[in-house]
Image: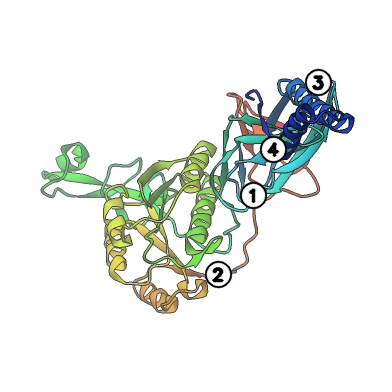
Amino acid sequence: MNKAQIHLGNPLALILAGSATVLAILIPNPVLTTLAVALVGLVSVAGLWAWHTRDRLSFSRTLRLEWAQVGDELEERFVLRNDSSLSLFWIELEDGSTVPGYPSSRVEAVDGHNIKRWTLAAECQQRGLYRLGPMTLHSSDPFGIWGLTWHDAATRDVLVYPPIVDLSGIDLPRGQTMGPSRTSQRAYQATTDAAGVREYAPGDSLSRIHWPSTARRNEFMVKEFDLYPSGDVWVVLDLDGRVQAGTGRESTVEYGVMLASSLAYRAVQENRAVGLAVYGPARTIVQPDRGLAQLWRILSVLTTAAPGEMPLEHVLAEVGAHVTRGMTAVVVTPALEVDWVVRLLGLARRGVTPSVLILDPVTFGGHGDAGALAGVLADMGIPGHIIRQGQAFDLIARRDPRRRTRYRATVLGRAIPIVAPTRRQRTGPRGQRTIEW
């Protein structure tokens, strides 16, 4: 924290002291002399008070964790230390933090050679990347003649991740890909299981030729391979600003981010690889992967996701280059036009298993008929689920208000919250230990 700047807080006192001094010189009078001495002495004592305390005040703030989720408590500890022998009867703390609903500005007092500590906790109401600080402290001498201003320029970023809700009531289809199981569908790629042989066709790879059958039949025969249900999921979040409805937390943007986060969490919990495509002001593609690291990677992208100007039809056209045969694509959108449905149907014809979560814009204050779109998707064999404003979801990662949240510390020292409902006894992955705050 920088040294305090001393400024004149009450000019009237200085004017009165100067006027009384001039009058006492021009008009010798015991009353005027006494008044001049008293006023000059008052201004001088107040100045000495401010000068004595300006370099002897220190301030610090400590954030418990540098991230949280919507619904969690953001907790910060403050320490105000006065090393002077004089008391500061009031100190106004003016905080420049950008966290919504975080009232860290306040007025405190601290005696001489004393320390004032307090803790501030507030519920995180909105996802995003926010700043804590800077902090400006204002005070004065007891008479308010000289003002003091300290400026603490230190800032810290804090991430508020989107909420994660239970989507167990929504059935998501699984795609088909190569694997060790029997199925009636045949793969275009070589897999671990050969289902049979067929005659050679132009374009078949020579590596797929089954030489014993070729020798018996005296013609080229190639192997066919099996498919098995795939766990790979692509989440496509539509952030086209022209189709969004609602404001603040009750908007299609926030519901879409919540659903995308929850889909990623669900896939990771099922040990499925999950990827993300979100086109806002920036085009972001997160390639499919498994594990908690992938979940936090996706949540980090969704934390700062904002509406853009790319239609869902164009998004699906670009994402189609990354989604391969056998995967599942889940689209989250409030767009009710059928243009993008044609693109989605094209992915289905390529062997991608699609599903759609439709955010009903009417319930968010918009226009359209979500039921009609769901009917069109049903006619094409594409599952569609309608999500409405105010629809009840159970928060998975919300902290129990009766006890502290428990965290895992990785081998690299990073704290990771236990997203699943916590228990008193819990065994984490190898190399991790459970910390209870």
Q: Please name which of the two marks, 4 or 2, marks the residue nearer to the observer.
A: 4
Residue 24 point in image, percent of width and height: 79, 29
Q: Which mark is residue 84?
A: 3
Q: Quadrant of the N terminus?
A: top right
How many other residues sit within 10 Å of disc 3, few (<14), some (14-19) or many (≥20)?
some
Q: Please name which of the two marks, 1 or 4, marks the residue nearer to the observer.
A: 4
For marks 1 and 2 on the same chain, the one whose residue lies earlier in the sequence: 1
> Foreground residue, 213 or 71?
71
The vertical placement of 202 against 148, above or below, is below
Residue at left offset 57%, top offset 45% = 98
Per the model, the C-alpha gap separating discs 1 and 2 is: 20 Å
Per the model, the C-alpha gap separating discs 1 and 4 is: 43 Å
Tell me which amino acid carries mark 2.
Answer: Gln
Res 136 quadrant in image: top right
Residue with the mark numbered 4: 11
Q: Which mark is residue 389?
A: 2
Tell me which amino acid carries mark 1.
Answer: Cys
For marks 4 and 2 on the same chain, the one whose residue lies earlier in the sequence: 4
Q: Please name which of the two marks, 1 or 2, marks the residue nearer to the observer.
A: 1
The vertical placement of 144 against 388, above or below, is above
Per the model, the C-alpha gap separating discs 1 and 3 is: 37 Å
- Cβ atoms under marks 3 and 4 closer than 8 Å: no
Residue 346 point in image, percent of width and height: 26, 62
Tell me which amino acid carries mark 3.
Answer: Ser
The vertical placement of 331 against 91, above or below, is below
Relative to 421, is 320 on the left or the right?
A: left
For marks 3 and 4 on the same chain, the one whose residue lies earlier in the sequence: 4
Per the model, the C-alpha gap separating discs 4 and 2 is: 57 Å
How many other residues sit within 10 Å of disc 2, few (<14), some (14-19) or many (≥20)?
some
